[in-house]
Every structure is written in structure tokens, then in C-alpha cells.
């Protein structure tokens, strides 16, 4: 069972910020939030992850609410190449390595 | 080298055939995963190996048989598959979850067609 809920689809104008929400209301204290994306017919690609603090890297920013029940992935300047399915995954930090995908959000960046 | 290599890229097999999918990584990762992905669906977890031991088996039918011969290699042996098993099979690797940098790297997948 997926532990996350995401909108099935979103559109974004090229050059604008894309804000992708994820609900993970049952998250436990030792579970991290991970984001991946999958461009058509390719393997998923890691974007970013965090526990409770906001995180930023060269691809995106991750904003996690204080209660950790939801998060937002921000692509600051979306390009056409960012069109993909974006998956939010909650994963516990243990050696069981249970990593399951929910339905994801299909982001379409439009010119 | 941050690559996960899957071979073959495409495979067509009959229902009575035996074939194997192969996955290789040289990042020193000790967790490796098999996923099955049908068209327009998310990847579905099948198996996870942690330190070369099977840690998760998602009640996958026995016609799929995983094997992890060493820390760099992961195989998926296929026997007596059904047409509904046709899908994209994805392999991934990561550091085990107890370590800090646990992002997973995925291969490009093997597109399997069962005829």
C-alpha cells in the first residue's frame, strides 16, 4: 500500500515554478520523503529527499511541513524536459529497504 | 560510475521458454531491487535484496525467481511466463536504508514481451 497521495496530473508553463504537492499523513518519525521522476520509457531518476528540514539541490527544492504530513517539490524554472511523472515516496531508514511507488503526478510543462 | 546496467533491453519469449534478466552496478550498493511496470502504471515492487539476502518478496509467483550471486549482480530468472507478465522490468540499487545517502539508481529496464 502506498503511503502517499498526489494529484494525478498538473500543468505548468515553461519558465515558471512547478509546485508538486504530496500528502503523507501517516508518516512515522523515522521515515524519509523521497522524490523521483520518470520520463517516458526511462528508468526513474532520483531528485531529492529529506526527513524534516527543507532541502535544496541543483534540481529542486523540497519543502516539508512542520508536522511532516505533507511536502511540496519545487522545480524553480520548469523546462519542457521536466515533463514527466513525479513520484513521492515515504521510506523508512532501515535495512529492509522497502521502497514503493504510489500513483504519482504527471507533470506537463507547456510552452 | 553511477550506472545500473540492465540486459537485455528487449526480450521476446514464449510461454515455455526459460530466460534471465541481468542487472549490474559498480557503486558498492548493498541493496538491489526488482520492479515490474505496466504501461501507464507506477513501478510495482517485486523483490529486494539487502546485503545479498532476500529481504522482501512481494508474493511474486514462483515463475519469477530472483538471484543475487554477489553484491554487484542481480538476476531475475523467468520460466513459464504468461502473456500478462509482459511489462517493463526495472532494476535499482542503493545503499541500505540505514545509511545516510540512500537514493536509488535505476536501470533503463528490460521490456519483456511474452508470446
Image (tube, coloured by chain):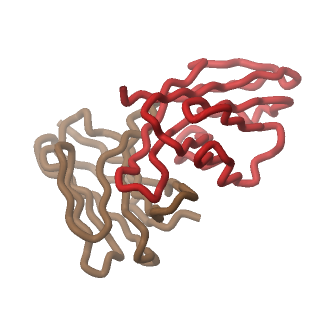
Point out residue B62 in the picture as x, y percentages from the top left corner: 83, 42
Q: Is residue B75 visible?
A: yes
Picture quadrant where residue A81 is located:
top left
The residue lying at 26 percent from left, 63 percent from top is: A72
Point out residue A97 in the picture as x, y percentages from the top left corner: 54, 55
Quarter of the image where the C terminus of chain B is located: top right
Q: Residue furthest bottom?
A: A67
Point out residue A3 in the picture as x, y percentages from the top left corner: 50, 67
Side (left or right) of B33 relative to A46: right
- Residue A68 vs A102, above or below: the answer is below
Colour in which chain A is drawn: brown
Colour in which chain B is drawn: red
The residue lying at 72 percent from left, 38 percent from top is: B66
Q: Is residue B44 visible?
A: no
Side (left or right) of B104 relative to B88: left
Point out residue A38 in the picture as x, y percentages from the top left corner: 40, 40
Quarter of the image where the N terminus of chain B is located: top left
- Residue B46 vs A28, above or below: the answer is above
The residue lying at 21 percent from left, 59 percent from top is: A55
- Residue A1 vs A60, above or below: the answer is below
Q: Between residue A93 and residue B91, name the one nearer to us.
A: A93
Side (left or right) of A38 relative to A63: right
The residue lying at 43 percent from left, 38 percent from top is: B105
Amino acid at each position: 500500500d502506498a503511503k502517499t497521495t498526489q494529484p494525478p496530473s498538473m500543468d505548468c508553463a515553461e519558465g515558471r515554478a512547478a509546485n508538486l504537492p504530496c500528502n503523507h499523513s501517516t508518516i512515522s518519525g523515522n521515515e524519509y520523503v523521497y522524490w523521483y521522476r520518470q520520463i517516458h520509457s526511462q528508468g526513474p531518476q532520483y531528485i531529492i529527499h529529506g526527513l524534516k528540514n527543507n532541502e535544496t539541490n541543483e534540481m529542486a527544492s523540497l519543502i516539508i511541513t512542520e508536522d511532516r504530513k505533507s511536502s511540496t517539490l519545487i522545480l524553480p524554472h520548469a523546462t519542457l524536459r521536466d515533463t514527466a511523472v513525479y513520484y513521492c515516496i515515504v521510506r523508512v531508514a532501515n535495512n529492509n529497504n522497502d521502497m514503493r511507488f504510489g500513483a504519482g503526478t504527471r507533470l506537463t510543462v507547456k510552452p | 560510475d553511477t550506472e545500473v546496467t540492465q540486459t537485455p533491453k528487449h526480450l521476446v519469449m514464449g510461454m515455455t521458454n526459460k530466460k534471465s534478466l541481468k542487472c549490474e552496478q559498480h557503486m558498492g550498493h548493498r541493496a538491489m531491487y526488482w520492479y515490474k511496470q505496466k504501461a501507464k502504471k507506477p513501478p510495482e515492487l517485486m523483490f529486494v535484496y539487502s546485503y545479498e539476502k532476500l529481504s522482501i518478496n512481494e508474493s511474486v509467483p514462483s515463475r519469477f525467481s530472483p538471484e543475487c550471486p554477489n553484491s554487484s549482480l542481480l538476476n531475475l530468472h523467468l520460466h513459464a511466463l504468461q502473456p500478462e507478465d509482459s511489462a517493463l522490468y526495472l532494476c535499482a540499487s542503493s545503499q541500505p536504508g540505514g545509511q545516510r545517502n540512500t537514493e536509488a539508481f535505476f536501470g533503463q529496464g528490460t521490456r519483456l514481451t511474452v508470446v
